[in-house]
Image: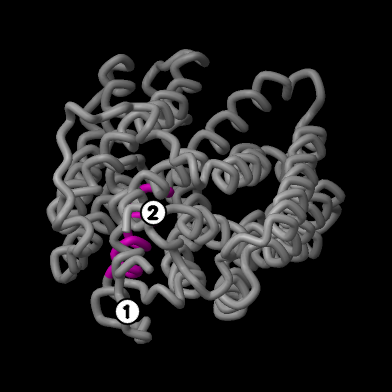
Amino acid sequence: MVCMNKRGKLWTKPFILLILANWFTFMSFQMLIPTLPPHMQNIGGSELSVGLVTTLFSVAAVLVRPFIGFILESQPRKQLILFGSVSLLVVTILYPFLHIVALFLLLRFMHGLGWGLSTTVNGTAAVDLIPSSRIGEGMGYFTLSVTLGMIIAPSLGIYIFQHYHFNALIFISGTLGVIALALFSLIKIPQPDSVKKLKVSFKSFSFFGSLIDRQSWYPALVTFLTAFGYGSIVTFIVIFTQEKSLEHVFLFYLFNALTATLVRPITGKWFDRKGPWSLILTCALLAFAGMWALILAKSNAYLILSGILFGMGYGSMIPALQSWVLSKTTREKSGTANGMYYSAIDMGIGLSGLLLGIIKPAVGTAALFELSSICFIVVIVLVFVDYVRQSRNRPRTVKGKGIVESRQA
């Protein structure tokens, strides 16, 4: 069994600080997701440039993660965590000073590099701090910082952008980044014995080998499809609610966040006791129902219902998927697996906005949600197929085991 934190205690000071710091990081970053494209438009960017704001960022994040995953196999986490936090803060502060489209896009690419570094290292550090037998529960709580950031921050960012100057948005985002950096600096993160002993050289580096962990590609594919389905909401929910004359879109985000928080203690323990399959199947069904509650929305009550269903569904599925990815790999490869997981989310949301944006003029906004809902059906099928396959092969399951036994032991 891999030696992480063998003690049963989950709520240690470093783990609590890491959750808080990661939440402030995601809040700082996610505020900018829906607001940078219209800002690009305001400084004279073309429709292509507006699209590149998201595309270049996603490409940069995906490109850097294999290198970070490779480095994490033999390097301490603390220095990389601080470097990632500082890089995100610097890039954020520079946005108001760049009014030339080409330079703005270059900065956006650099932002993607910093984001790819930060998310991969922070997630790997969480694995180091969580007891092996509580990986599902622990990653559930850690990923709550991700989920809440993704749910709360975009709505907050839109409000600030619409009612105040862009510089006010950057000031608040930067302040959250400073708080995150301060919290990161207080964390003591142990270096696993396997990382201390392993010596790697970039002569042995393989980009595609570090981009994809062969043991955990299947749950990463499920993660991509899940993120693609949710990407339509991230991109088009404001436009959709305006078309429907629903003024209180914040209700969707509010009840999404509340529900995701309330059910997290249950879903984390569910994963550790029964494995990922029944949990993810249930969550995918709830997310599908939440999507159709949004499609059929005629009043704010539908937004509340959709938010509740998505909080239980998508909000619980994301941490379960990360735990599933990690449970399939070895301790040494957890950095690569984490990078692949976050890349699956970035590519899913990024490609969703791009592809659905292309077909939107031909089908309308509601039809985009209908098409996206199919992703959750595909997820149900893939998870059920894997469950049947695992049942037939009778391998060691992830139930209560955390990361699987290292094949290098």
The rendered magenta stretch, by its main secondary structure, is classed as helix
Residue 377, above or below 52? below
**Are the two marked residues, 1 and 2, in contact with CB atoms closer than 8 angstroms?**
no
What amino acid type should be assigned to the residue bearing mark 1? Lys
Q: Residue at x 56, y 38 (%)?
A: 349
Tell me where residue 201 sits by quadrant.
top left
Q: Nearer the viewer, residue 137 or 296?
A: 137
Question: Left or right: where does residue 159 sit relative to residue 360?
Answer: left
- Image x and y of residue 381, in percent: 79, 47
Q: Residue at x 55, y 44 (%)?
A: 220
The answer to if 38 sits in the magenta stretch is: no
Q: Nearer the viewer, residue 396 or 248?
A: 396
Q: Which region shows up in magenta?
A: 18-30
Give the mark, 1 or 2, whose residue is nearer the N terminus. 1
Residue 68, above or below 174? above
The label number, if any, that marks residue 407 in the structure image: 2
Residue of label 1:
6
- Image x and y of residue 277, in percent: 69, 61
Residue 27, above or below 255? above
The answer to if 20 sits in the magenta stretch is: yes
Q: What is the spatial separation of the Cα atoms under label 1 and label 2, in whole angstroms?
A: 19 Å
Question: Left or right: where does residue 123 sit relative to residue 315?
Answer: left
Question: Secondary structure under badge 2?
Answer: loop
Q: Nearer the viewer, residue 364 or 166?
A: 364
